[in-house]
Amino acid sequence: RAKADGRGTKRFFEVEMDVSLRARRALEIDLREALEREEFELHYQPIYDFRGRRIGGFEALVRWRHPVRGLVPPAEFIAVAEEIGLIVPLGAWCLTTACTEAMRWPDGIKVAVNVSAVQFRDEIIVESVRAALAKSRLPPGRLELEITESVLLKDNLATLATLYALRRLGVRIAMDDFGTGYSSLSYLRSFPFDKIKIDQSFVRDITSKTDSGLIVRAVIGLGLSLGMRTTGEGIETQEQFDRLRCEGCDEGQGYFFAKPGPARDVPRMIERWSSAGTGNSRAVA
Ligand code: C2E
Ligand code: MG
Ligand code: MG
Ligand code: MG
């Protein structure tokens, strides 16, 4: 009896496996064709400069405009794109598109592009960035690359060489999702990042949990002493906004300012958060 149940369970499990493997294979094929069919698009989320009281730049966030599934978020395809190597051409497309679209924005408004650890292999990323800058003619100082700690996990010397090669191109480098990986502090010591983005998990609890508040304060202090700017991610409330500004954070990003939107929304987002005349930027909105 128990044996039969076991076999039944196993057979059921195998069927399940088969279904998910098929789905996975289908997704891979779909994803590969998506790039050729130009189904990807970038949405932009404003990054607010606390001191300048204005939008200083935008983060480019990729979406897949699927003909059947609608707008697919990166969480549902970036990992697969990395595994099948598609992230390299997709990442290059993101860089070129972001730089080209940023050329239409007012002078000085920066664009931040997320870069996957996989793009860091074989220094391909340096060529992709160089090509995107050349094609778009965007001044390198207006491009910022966001990398996560996973980039620094393997082959540290090669990675550092790549980071310095990127720095020599004139682009800025930000450490994304800071505080979520392993031994974050040693990473900050090994490379002079321009910016630390404080992960949204700390910002979410900044007013409700003492330890999150203390961590945010410590990271801002770290940024100050290391000469790196700090950005609070995932700001959703006025309280979080006020707290981060008071703690001396340089920039903020989150639904409180705006959700990521298509390129055509960029001028409206800049306008809405320009300080023009009043102390409270929300009052002009
Ligand atoms: P990330 O780089 O940390 O981007 C921030 C994510 O937080 C975005 O999710 C954004 O929509 C979301 N977010 C912003 N403000 C708030 C808020 O106030 N509350 C909440 N709950 N969430 C907020 P999204 O667009 O789904 O992207 C998720 C992740 O996918 C990104 O995290 C990044 O790691 C990755 N990603 C996005 N675009 C690209 C890309 O072009 N290339 C690569 N390699 N990865 C990308
Ligand atoms: Mg990011
Ligand atoms: Mg982040
Ligand atoms: Mg994140």
Image: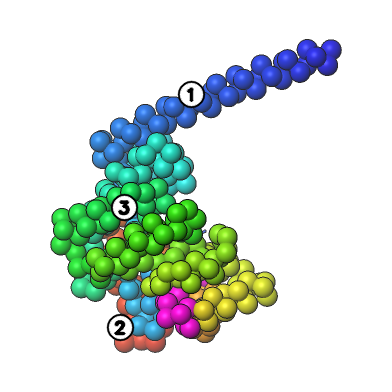
Q: Mark 1: few, some, or many residues within 10 Å (few <14, many ≥20)?
A: few
Give the percent coordinates (x, y) of residue 1. 84, 12
Asked which quadrant contains residue 160, the reply is bottom left
Q: Which residue is mark 1?
A: 22
Amino acid type shown at disc 3: Glu
Asked which quadrant contains residue 54, the reply is bottom left
Magenta stretch in the rendered image: 223-237
Residue 216 visible, this angle: yes
User: Label 1 vs label 2: CA separation?
Assistant: 55 Å
Q: Secondary structure at mark 2?
A: loop
Quick one: label 1 or label 2, which is nearer the N terminus?
1
Q: Mark 2: few, some, or many residues within 10 Å (few <14, many ≥20)?
A: few
Q: Is residue 59 above or below residue 226?
A: above
Give the percent coordinates (x, y) of residue 173. 36, 66
Q: Secondary structure at mark 3?
A: helix
Q: Quadrant of the C terminus?
A: bottom left
Q: Which residue is mark 2?
A: 276
